Amino acid sequence: MKIRKAVIPVAGLGTRFLPATKAIPKEMLTVVDRPTIQYIVEEVVASGIEQVILVTSEGKSAIENHFDYDFELDTILKMKKKDRMAEELNHVSNLIDIVSVRQKKPLGLGHAIWSTRDVVGDEPFAVLLGDDLVLSDQPCCQQMIALFDVVQESIVAVQRVPMDQTGNYGIVEGKPYNDRTYEINKMIEKPAPGITDSNMAIIGRYILLPEIFSLLEQTRPGHGGEIQLTDALLKLSQQRAMYAYEFQGTRFDAGDKLGYLKAIVAFGLRHSELGEPFRKHLKQVSENL
Ligand code: G1P
């Protein structure tokens, strides 16, 4: 089956990024010239997906506005002969069909995904977490869809992390399936030291079968008192095959202050107009460090 829908949870409070995120959603923080959420939606579009389902909460309307058509702004920009900017904004509002679902209580990622069950329906779908920006030649989500076309089972994107950081991630254990893919036999959300030898960490890209919804419904609060997607995935992996995919590309944790700075440098260097002058500037700065 084709992957037509992508769920993007954006209901989180962004406490790791205070005070910047006190009055604006963390997904609206800018990397170079666009908010981080736009990179995620662009990845979805480039992966051939047709609809985005945002899981929102109070105070997140700036995200919906960003992807909406703004008649007043469009008229003013055209009057001022700023046609190129008007075109760019229209490109953003025409990117993709977006619907929003409210997560009524902050009960965790698993609960956020469960909130989309009626909109997703009975078909496989992608999940992209807004904190994880991936810089790659082929969009990470598209790489995963290519694998899904072959295996037709759930997939989580993984990367190796230093052992002392495994407690920040969902960790998977598995046996090699092919070059970049592992068949999962265990998953643990944010393991305490010594619980696992694996350093294969889930990053925020998933392809899920709709069977996940009934499992999420039965999932009791886990790590941090939240309903964890990883716990429901573990149950699904015990019922049928599930794969971990080591994607090609570099992932940035844009929800973390240092990760965000690294993302700005990496995306700045890749920017079509700013890349070259920015590279020169960075060279100068590093020589003077
Ligand atoms: C979530 C998931 C975790 C995953 C991580 C990737 O955690 O629960 O399994 O490794 O995203 O970014 P969070 O970072 O939201 O605490």
Image (cartoon, helix red, strand yellow):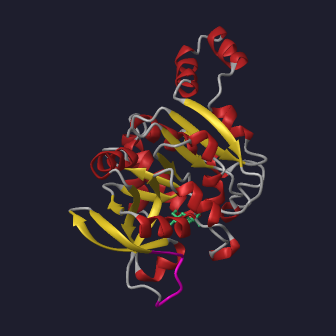
Q: Main secondary structure of the magenta part?
A: loop
User: Above or below — where is 249 with respect to 1?
Assistant: below
At horizontal 57% and vertical 62% (from top left) the residue drawn is: 215
Based on the displayed image, in which of its 4 quarters is residue 97 positioned? Answer: top right
Q: Which residues are magenta?
A: 187-194
Quadrant containing ligand 1: bottom right
Q: Is residue 253 magenta?
A: no
User: Above or below — where is 173 with respect to 183?
Assistant: below
| The N terminus, quarter of image | top left
Q: What is the residue that sits farthest to the left in this orientation? A: 179
Residue 178 as seen in the image, left or right of residue 106: left
Residue 238 appears in the rendering: yes
Could you say which is closer to the camera, residue 164 or residue 211? 211
Residue 154 drawn at (x, y percent): 41, 56
Residue 28 appears in the rendering: no
Residue 245 drawn at (x, y percent): 33, 60
User: Above or below — where is 151 with respect to 75?
Assistant: below
Residue 148 as seen in the image, left or right of residue 210: left
Based on the displayed image, in which of its 4 quarters is residue 242 positioned? Answer: bottom left
